[in-house]
């Protein structure tokens, strides 16, 4: 019959398997982040190339495409290491669906690049195509964060996801501003888009600061210090305050791109630090869990030896033996049904320790996941507003924020209210 210690050992082995899976997921997040960074730069250079009518940035763009192709291959290799057995991953359906979408987008990327090279697409359409692909990649990171069963790992993944999302908004800002400067003319809709992207960056960075460690937040704060952002703020004012249709200095396109790139490179340094911490945490937890397993197995072995020793004195001798020693031989232990007192206390302490640890982990994990669940809730009503009011994503989000301000409610409360009204909304016209 299996003992409580046997099941503790089984639980610890499951924990190690989950942590090892998290280590693979952390490596996947790391590679995904590097590809996102490369595609963000490729997107900006493509916008400059198209807005300049193909007269500039062709060389740097080709070099960046080659770099992204290498990262693409690395990510595909990382996908191949994932365990696709249904029983092995708690949210495998969502994660694998995201990966399938991403692979489809990566397969279509060469065709997009050919259209850009032939100048067949506008900067806006090109930006939107890259945004969709990068959003899919960020979705993989989101599902990785949502699948984490360890609260410390989950916390770091949530911080990393929100920071990567902020960096993506910064990348969209770089591409949008580059297109405006290179075209030499202000456009009201694009200016509004810039303002929305700036606000979105700050929103994501607030969540990042809630979940990230002190070292990462300090590094980000250094990158956002006034001297580093002074030039960016000056260029932002030029872009956002120019009258609709007004002239912009096309020579500033390179200045803008370089300024935004320096900021994104600083953000990438923070992201790399987060990725490194994540790998270290996973390695440390696997090592600690493995040490615990060795301790449990040593106790189990000791219990087995003690049980074997006791059972020896309960067995009848193989053949009758003449002896002068009576049945009550002094010094021999009496038969026992369980482990020795010392072992029983040790196992009880392990069970209690495991119960306390799992309770604490569950409470913290629930707190961390609240941020991810809030994001899920907000995305659904935003899609409803886009469909039924024919709004852009920026307009839908702005509408929800305005509703929250007018009603003096949190954004999540407004989102839940919109969802509650979904059934009475008129059907969308084809």
Image (cartoon, rainbow, N blue to C red):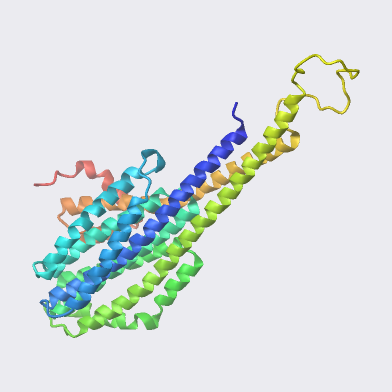
Pick out the residue farthest to the right. 324
Q: Nearer the viewer, residue 62 or 38?
A: 62
* Coordinates of residue 424 in the picture (x, y in percent): 20, 42
* Coordinates of residue 135 in the picture (x, y in percent): 27, 58
Q: Considering only vertical position in the picture, is 396 above or below 174? A: above
Left or right, 92 with reference to 399: right
What residue do we see at 74% from left, 20% from top? 315
* Coordinates of residue 145 in the picture (x, y in percent): 40, 53
What residue do we see at 76% from left, 17% from top? 316
Q: Quick one: quadrant of the N terminus? A: top right
What residue do we see at 38% from left, 45% from top? 83
Left or right, 10 with reference to 416: right
The picture quadrant where one finds residue 320 is top right
What residue do we see at 47% from left, 55% from top? 153
Residue 195 seen in the figure: no
For the image shown, how many numbered marks are present on the structure?
0
Left or right, 205 with reference to 190: right
* Coordinates of residue 314 in the picture (x, y in percent): 75, 21
Q: Nearer the viewer, residue 196 or 99?
A: 99
Q: Nearer the viewer, residue 208 or 87?
A: 87
Q: Considering only vertical position in the picture, is 170 above or below 139? A: below
Residue 19 seen in the figure: yes
């Amino acid at each position: 019959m299996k003992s409580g210690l046997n099941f503790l050992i089984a639980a610890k082995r499951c924990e190690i398997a989950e942590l090892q899976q998290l280590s693979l997921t952390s490596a996947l997040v790391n590679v995904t982040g590097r590809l996102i960074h490369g595609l963000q730069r490729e997107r900006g250079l493509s916008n400059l190339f198209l807005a300049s009518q193909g007269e500039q940035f062709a060389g740097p763009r080709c070099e960046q495409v080659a770099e992204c192709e290498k990262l693409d291959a690395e990510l595909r290799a990382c996908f191949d290491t994932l365990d696709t057995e249904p029983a092995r991953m708690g949210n495998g359906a969502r994660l694998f669906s995201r990966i399938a979408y991403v692979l489809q987008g990566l397969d279509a990327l060469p065709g997009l690049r050919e259209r850009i090279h032939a100048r067949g697409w506008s900067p806006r359409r090109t930006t939107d195509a890259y945004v969709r692909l990068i959003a899919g990649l960020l979705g993989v990171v989101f599902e990785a964060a949502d699948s984490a069963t360890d609260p410390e790992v989950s916390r770091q993944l949530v911080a990393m996801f929100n920071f990567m999302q902020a960096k993506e908004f910064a990348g969209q800002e770089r591409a949008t501003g580059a297109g405006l400067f290179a075209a030499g003319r202000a456009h009201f809709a694009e200016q509004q888009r810039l303002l929305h992207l700036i606000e979105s960056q700050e929103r994501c960075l607030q969540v990042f600061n809630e979940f990230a460690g002190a070292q990462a937040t300090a590094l980000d704060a250094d990158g956002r210090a006034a001297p580093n952002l002074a030039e960016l703020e000056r260029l932002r004012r030029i872009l956002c305050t120019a009258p609709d249709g007004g002239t912009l200095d096309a020579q500033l396109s390179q200045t803008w791109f370089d300024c935004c790139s320096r900021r994104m490179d600083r953000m990438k340094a923070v992201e790399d630090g987060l990725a490194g911490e994540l790998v270290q945490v996973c390695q440390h937890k696997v090592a600690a869990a493995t040490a615990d397993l060795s301790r449990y197995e040593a106790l189990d072995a000791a219990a087995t030896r003690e049980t074997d020793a006791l059972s020896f004195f309960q067995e009848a001798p193989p053949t009758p033996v003449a002896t002068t020693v009576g049945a009550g031989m002094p010094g021999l232990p009496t038969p026992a049904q369980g482990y020795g007192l010392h072992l029983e206390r040790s196992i009880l302490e392990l069970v209690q320790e495991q119960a306390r640890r799992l309770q604490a982990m569950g409470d913290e994990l629930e707190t961390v996941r609240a941020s991810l669940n809030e994001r899920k809730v907000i995305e659904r009503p935003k899609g409803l507003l886009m469909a039924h009011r024919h709004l852009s994503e920026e307009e839908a989000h702005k509408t929800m924020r305005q509703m929250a301000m007018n009603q003096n409610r949190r954004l999540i409360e407004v989102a839940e209210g919109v969802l509650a009204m979904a059934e009475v909304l008129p059907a969308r016209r084809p």
